[in-house]
Amino acid sequence: MMKTSLALRRRTLLLATPALAMPAIGRAQETFPSRTIEIVTHAGVGGGTDITARMMMVHAPAEFKQELVVVNRVGGSGATALAYAASKPRDGHTILLITQTHLLTLLRGRAPGLTYEDIVGVARATEDPQVLMVGKGSPFRTAKDFLEAAKTTKLKFGTTQVGGVDHLAVYGFAKEAGIQQPTIVPFRGGGDIAINLVSGNIDAALLNPAEPEAQIKAGDIIPLLVLHEERVPSIPDTPTAKEIGINSSHATVRGFAVLKGVPEDRLAILEEKLIKAMSTPLYQNYLASTGQAKGSVAGRKVWQAQLDAFYRTGREALAELGITR
């Protein structure tokens, strides 16, 4: 009787062991993240995108219960960063911090092996409205004066790159406002554009509010029109395009994305934790101090829709301008 009972107990334990082990295995598989998360940027250390990543990362480790590191892969207007991300497993441990520049690089076929369909938006990090600005010597003192003249006169606009984000914003704004397509004068950056506005070498530019902040305060540059849904706190007297009857919205945006293939449950975790890390007073103060829109931080639905819209309009604009490759 004792031998029978002992054998029965052994068989019961053997049968029970796999059942007991299975939940433990399941729990191990569900743990995410399980190692350091890489934030891949196309900017060098100290660049705007790099700083955005590092500001998010101040509180992110506490949310993810893992360390995060910035991986700077500079070159090719985002192509180098995209290639680096493509070399990594698509398991959620590699996140891209992208701008519209990455999408233009994909549009122009400069990221071999990748297409726009590989980009999955996770959370928007910044939205920096673009503002129509003129120099202090300009004859235009209001947006209406400027637009009236621009209907019949081909003005000179400063941008950072032919076929780049700023150029497409100028092109789109001109179409939306019903003015002459301007002559594009490219410069190395916003600082150079601001200098040439003040000197009168160009008639206008679309700049982010923080770029010529000192010149605006000094009265050397005059903001005429905000291309966003809301006015910018640092220039509260400048109206929005919608206020004068123009449906035009353009901004420089940054946001987090992964390459297609990351499991849905991990995408949800990334979205939740990134938004929490960017909802802290520290990050929100960073947005305010750099002139970003109040609602800069947004989730997957809003961010993906914005990416889709820019890709669509960017493709159309490049085709119309004859700059497809």
Image (cartoon, rainbow, N blue to C red):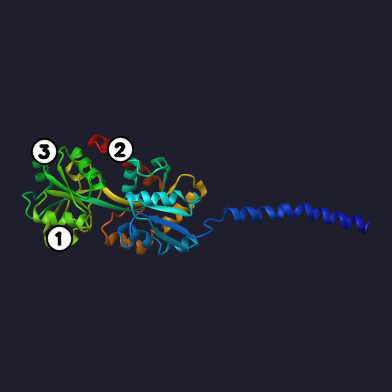
Marks 3 and 2, Cα distance to the nearest angstrom? Answer: 25 Å
**Residue located 68% across and 52% down the image:** 22
Q: Amino acid at mark 3?
A: Lys
Q: Residue 4: image x %, image y %?
A: 91, 55
Q: Which residue is mark 3?
A: 151
Cα–Cα span, label 3 and label 1: 27 Å
- Tag on residue 215? 1
Residue 315: which numbered mark, if any? 2
Going from N to C along the chain, the mark reached first, 3 or 2, is 3
Q: Residue 190 placed where, x, y %?
A: 21, 55
- Position of the N terminus by quadrant: bottom right
Give the number of the mark in front: 3 or 2.
2
**Which residue is depicted at the point 6% across and 54% down?**
137
Name the one closer to the observer, 146 or 69.
69
Q: Position of residue 92 (x, y in %)?
A: 48, 52
In the depicted view, which residue is nearer to us: 17 or 302?
A: 17
**Whether residue 206 can be seen here:** yes
